[in-house]
Image (cartoon, rainbow, N blue to C red):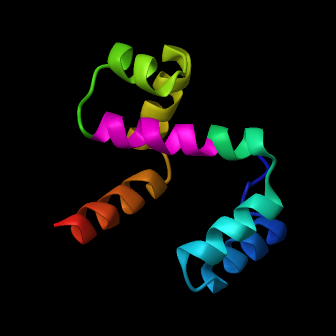
Amino acid sequence: MKTYRTQKLKKLADAFLSLKDSEQMLNFLRDLCTLEELEELSARFEVAEMLAKGMSYRKISSIAKVSTTTITRIALWLEHGEGGYKAVLNKKKKHSV
């Protein structure tokens, strides 16, 4: 199986890490992605946040306007993925306390 951790992806990750604040990040994301891609990425993260809060799939679907299939996929990655969602959600939780 070909790895997703390509040199190109590592360069992109480094580019994200080089930004100093959310304004620079927003500008970079807008230049990098289409409006549809930004909406999709934002919705996925919103779903992950709601799943972490224990909300039902039906409620999440009605709020985020995504299918329960999409929610199931995000839930799978949240629980059995690389730990990226959990790392960000935990960090966000610590900063909000």
Q: Quadrant of residue 35?
A: top right
49 magenta-colored: yes
Residue at the extreme left: 97
1 magenta-colored: no
Rendering coords of residue 79 (x, y %): 38, 40
Is 91 situated above or below 36? below
96 or 3: nearer the viewer = 96
Rendering coords of residue 63 (x, y %): 42, 24
The quadrant the N terminus occupies is: top right
The quadrant the C terminus occupies is: bottom left
Q: Is residue 93 left or right of residue 16?
A: left
90 or 32: nearer the viewer = 32
Rendering coords of residue 25 (x, y %): 63, 71
Q: Quadrant of residue 37?
A: top right
Residue pictured at 81% horizontal, 61% vertical: 32
Boundaries of the magenta span: 41-52
Q: Is residue 16 left or right of residue 65?
A: right
How would you classify the magenta stretch by its main secondary structure? Answer: helix
